[in-house]
Amino acid sequence: MCVGSIIGCGWRRLNGTAIAEFDDAVRQLGDIVRRLPAKRVFIVTDTTLAKVGVLTAATAPLRDAGIEIGVFDGGQAEPSLLIIEQSTEEARRFGPDASPFPHGPARFT
C-alpha cells in the first residue's frame, strides 16, 4: 500500500501563495505506517532538511510508534544518477518494508 494514498494534505494561502499543510499528516505518520502494516521505513532526504528539523519532525512519530528507520541524507533536488544509485544501495541494505511508491512496498532485490 502506498503511504501517499493514506496521507492527505490541506492547502491554504500565505501571502497569496498556496502552501500544503503537512503538520497533521506528519504527526500521524506512526499510525499511518503501522496500518500499512510496516515495521521498517527508509527515508531519502537532504542535509538541509535534516539540519532544519524536518527529518526529526518526520522520524519522531515513527520512532514513537516503534518503527525502525533508515535514512539517506545525501539527496538533492534533481539528483544525479550516482546519488540515486547510492540511496538505492543504502535502501537495499536496510531492507524497508514500506514505500511511498504507488505500486506497493519497495523491492530492492
Image (cartoon, rainbow, N blue to C red):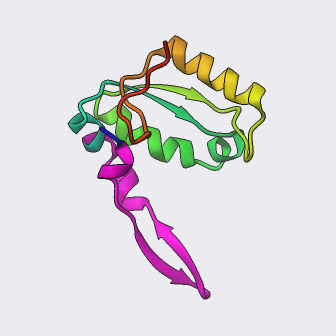
On-image quarter of the N terminus: top left
The residue positioned farthest toward the front in the image shown: 103
Q: Is residue 23 magenta?
A: yes
Q: Nearest the camera: 34 or 104?
A: 104
* Residue 7 in magenta stretch: yes
Q: Where is residue 68 in the image (x, y as percent from the top left)?
A: 39, 23
Between 10 and 81, the residue placed more toward the observer is 81
Q: In which quarter of the image is residue 19?
A: bottom right
74 sits left or right of 106 in the view? right
Give the magenta part as a residue range. Answer: 3-31
Residue 69 lies, in percent from the top left, at 44, 26
x and y percentages locating residue 27 in the rendered image: 35, 52
Asked if residue 6 lies left or right of residue 17, the reply is left
Residue sitting at x 64%, y 47%? 49
Residue found 31% across the figure and 24% down from its top: 39
- Extreme bottom residue here? 16
What residue do we see at 71% from left, 32% from top?
74
Residue 88 position, x and y percent, is: 60, 23
